[in-house]
Image (spheres, rainbow, N blue to C red):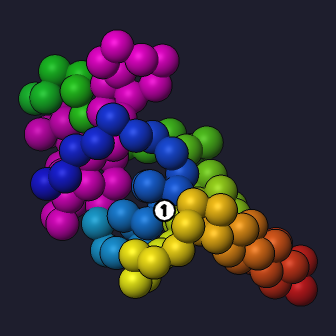
Amino acid sequence: MLFTYSAAPAVRGTLRSLGFNVYKTTAVGGKKGGTMAANKTIDKDLMQASNGLIYELSEEEEARLSTSSALPYRDPDGTFSGEEIRNNRLLEQADFLKNKKN
């Protein structure tokens, strides 16, 4: 299992694209909960036993994973500057939106 405080669609989308099952965690010191990723499906009994710490993603959160905001920031070789990473993501998002219209 992997836990992160991030609830960003880019993080959740990347985890989902890597084959993880993605869940929401309760908020700890922030407005939104974080993310838990697991290589197996967490059954509803275990979620209930977690005393409200683990939830399935809401419909709205699931919908966001189908948008351009779920595309990851990529730097496959670890050589890009921050600006290059952001610019490449913007281009990838534009391609995503263009292809979605077709």
Q: Nearer the viewer, residue 1 or 40?
A: 1
What residue sits 31% from the left and 25% below the top?
Answer: 26
Query: Which region shows up in magenta?
Result: 21-48
Residue 62 locus on image (x, y percent): 54, 52
Residue 78 locus on image (x, y percent): 40, 76
What residue sits 81% from the left and 73% below the top?
Answer: 94
Q: Is residue 91 left or right of residue 6?
A: right
Residue 38 locus on image (x, y percent): 20, 58
Q: Is residue 3 left or right of residue 99?
A: left
User: For residue 44: magenta?
Assistant: yes
Task: Work out whether 101 lies above or below 67.
Answer: below
Image quadrant assignment for residue 33: top left
Residue 24 locus on image (x, y percent): 36, 39
Q: Nearer the viewer, residue 62 or 46?
A: 62
**What residue would you read off at disc 1?**
13
Image quadrant assignment for residue 92: bottom right
- Whether residue 3 can be seen here: yes
Name the secondary structure under disc 1: helix
Task: Work out whether 69 lies above or below 3.
Answer: below
Q: Nearer the viewer, residue 31 or 61?
A: 31
What residue sits 19% from the left and 52% below the top?
Answer: 2
Indicate the amino acid at tag 1: Gly
